[in-house]
Image: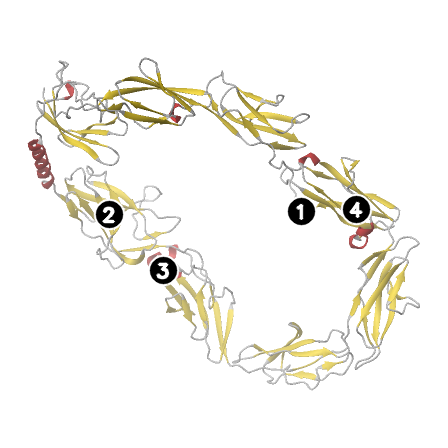
Amino acid sequence: MKKALSITGTTLVFAFLLLANSSLNAQTIALQAPEPADNPNIGGNSPWDRACGSASFNEYFVTINWVGSTNSNNQFILELSDASGSFGSATTLSTITDQNSNSEFLTSFSLGTNIQGDGYRMRVRSTSPASTSPASPAYSMYYLGHTTNLHISPDGDGSTPGTLQVCDGGNVTLTVDNIPANEVGAYQYAWYRSGTPIGTGPSIVTTGNGEYFVFIDYGDCTGSANTESNHIIINTGTSTGIAVNNQANTALCEGDAAPALEANVQNGSYTYTWYKDGNVVRTAQAGGFSYTIDTDDPSFAGDYTVQIQGAGICTETSAPVTITNAGSFSVNRINNQNVVVLPSQSEALSVSTDANSPTYQWYRNGIAISGATSGSYNVTQQGTYYAAITQTGGTCSSTTINSEETTVVSPAEFRMEIDYATEYTSCTNSSMVLETATIYAVLADGTELDVTDDVASSFTYQWRKDGTAISGETARSISLTTNNENGNYSVDGSFAGIDTTSNTLPLQLSGSGSLVISSSSTVYCSSDDNINISTETDLSGETFGWQRNGTTINSTDTVLNVSEPGTYRLVVQKGECPVISNEISITPLDPELITLSEDGDVIFPEGSSKTVTASGGTAYRWYDSNNNEVSSTDSYSFTAEGTYTLVATIDNCEIVRTITADYLDLFNIPNVITPNGDGANDQWIIPNSYSNKSDVNVIIYNAKGKEVLNATNYQNNWPESSTSFSQQNMVYYYVIKNANETLKQGTITVIR
């Protein structure tokens, strides 16, 4: 190794820094205030006079003008004042680094979401040299964070009343309710009552009659938003304390002469509306402060109220007065609503009641049945039946209540419908229950009646798949859990000698994830490899296909021999549904899977050793320069220079690496080179502890600080030619570093 000439470069470094500092101090610049400019990305030719940003538009441009000269590292910074025009805590709108040669240029900015005001100013600063422009005129700038209609409601309850009534000098708090709580305080609001401004917060307390609404005050930008709220009309008045006078008797019998209900406030100029159970029983009537209950109506019992309205008073509703039917009693139908009577059979109908001394009368199709005067009745023919129960004792006698009707049918046949018990999608569900959902009685005239609840438990069932009876499946429903059961299903039913067959439902279940494939290897070395993919699922008698990258390549072999890399899977067809296996990726051999603990050449001092460890393989063999195996583990300790070979195995593939071992260079980094083509000291040669290393970065700068070399794995080959040096005795600066620290730095003098 040639020795490098060593000289000191400290003086040259000082001269270089002083020259640069002198040049920097000589630069001057004058900046003008930034001016609004057209947005080149949209049509129009008018600079903006206000900034109204929002989520849908937030891009503004300004023109920056300057004279003078800047340094190469100069930045222009566009700044925004606060809403009062102060730059004490200015906001940076834009930083520009590429306009040091343009005395006039455009730059864009966006409004921050907190920008709200009419007094914002802008200015521009330069950093090298440092200078600040005058401030621009004040502009209205608002970020329109909310651009849809506000909603107001009493106490923010979310209602939309339209009109509210306030009695006896009270008030209502109206609140904006459709802006999140953490944002509602970020805006200034403009509240109005009948056209007069009354407040600026998110809530307002009403102060009398009027029409109230609010919008967000965005200053000059208000028209760019659409925030006006719903309007609420406030009416004020005096409470009358309306009530219904106490009634001597609130338990009445049907048909009794009932006393009139009277309001406690009786004024011929007021209107009164009467309600029963919240429903109007007499519309608004001037002076109608009394109401007489019609007890001839069996449904007269209920809660009665009266509403009062009039000039200067509040519209109010009284508390309810409950009127009961003293003769009321209950009647319950015990049998089902629909009853099927088969030929030569009968079915019992029955009712229960808590009436005092009841009497019974049964009716068929509205006609009383002679002798049917007990709490039950056996029917033998179809029709509509009910029982009339009369109370003959107690406070109110002779009150009659009819039971609910029962429809009795005598079917000519039955019709059954089956359905999926839960939501079903072909080839998506992995299991499903089919059920007999509905049974209809078909009458002689062709009409049908749903009698499922009445007869379903009496039917016998036989389920069929593709027309063939399924052994043991004789319940009302059938549970199917595998795709081997895919097919078309129906059920036969029979009751009292009447047979019927249901509709047919298709069923295509997906696979349950049980199709699994495995491979003998996942690394493809060459066409000589023998990689097999197989499954434990029995494929005999199945329709299947092996796929590579989604395309079927084999549909006959139960074990697939892989001939090239790719993503493989197996698809088995079950009826209309494919069952898809897991995927296996067979990848080409990647030599980079084998890594070494030492990057580049192995360097160690003569007389010592250096251990290198390999990883990523399943087996290793190390050979010296004479092709002798020296290790069969993952590491080897080098003690002599030479060229070594590592053979690493991954599955059935081998990766070969050549490793050069050198003794550590002990010479210093040279600070002088003579690239004159004589073969001596023509390149800058550094010790092998720094060269040919991917984790070591070598950087060389010229006297002006410009990079002329920036490399890892430096090959001791700079300069590649002597023609790049225009002067004698040129000085360069170098830095050698790794990811964490600077290892070496200094100067290089090039002597020609």
* Between 263 and 224, the one nearer to me in the picture: 263
Mark 3 and mark 2 lie on one chain; the one further toward the N terminus is 2
Judged from the image, the secondary structure of the residue bearing numbered disc 3 is helix
* Camera-side mark, 3 or 1: 1
Mark 3 and mark 1 lie on one chain; the one further toward the N terminus is 3
* Camera-side mark, 4 or 1: 1
Residue at position x 71%, y 76% from top? 301
Q: Position of residue 279 (x, y in %)?
A: 66, 71
Mark 4 and mark 3 lie on one chain; the one further toward the N terminus is 3
* Camera-side mark, 3 or 2: 3
* Between 578 and 223, the one nearer to me in the picture: 578
- Within-10-Å neighbours for mark 1: few <14, some 14–19, many 20+: few
Mark 4 and mark 2 lie on one chain; the one further toward the N terminus is 2
* Amino acid type of the residue tagged 2 in the rendering: Leu
* Camera-side mark, 4 or 2: 4
Q: Position of residue 679 (x, y in %)?
A: 15, 14
Mark 4 and mark 1 lie on one chain; the one further toward the N terminus is 4
* Amino acid type of the residue tagged 3 in the rendering: Ala
* Amino acid type of the residue tagged 1 in the rendering: Thr
Q: Which residue is mark 1?
A: 422
Gap between marks 4 and 1 measured at Cα = 18 Å
Q: Position of residue 729 (x, y in %)?
A: 8, 24
Q: Which residue is mark 4?
A: 416
Query: In the image, 647: left or right of 325?
Result: left
Gap between marks 4 and 3 measured at Cα = 65 Å
Q: Which mark is residue 78?
A: 2
* Amino acid type of the residue tagged 4 in the rendering: Met
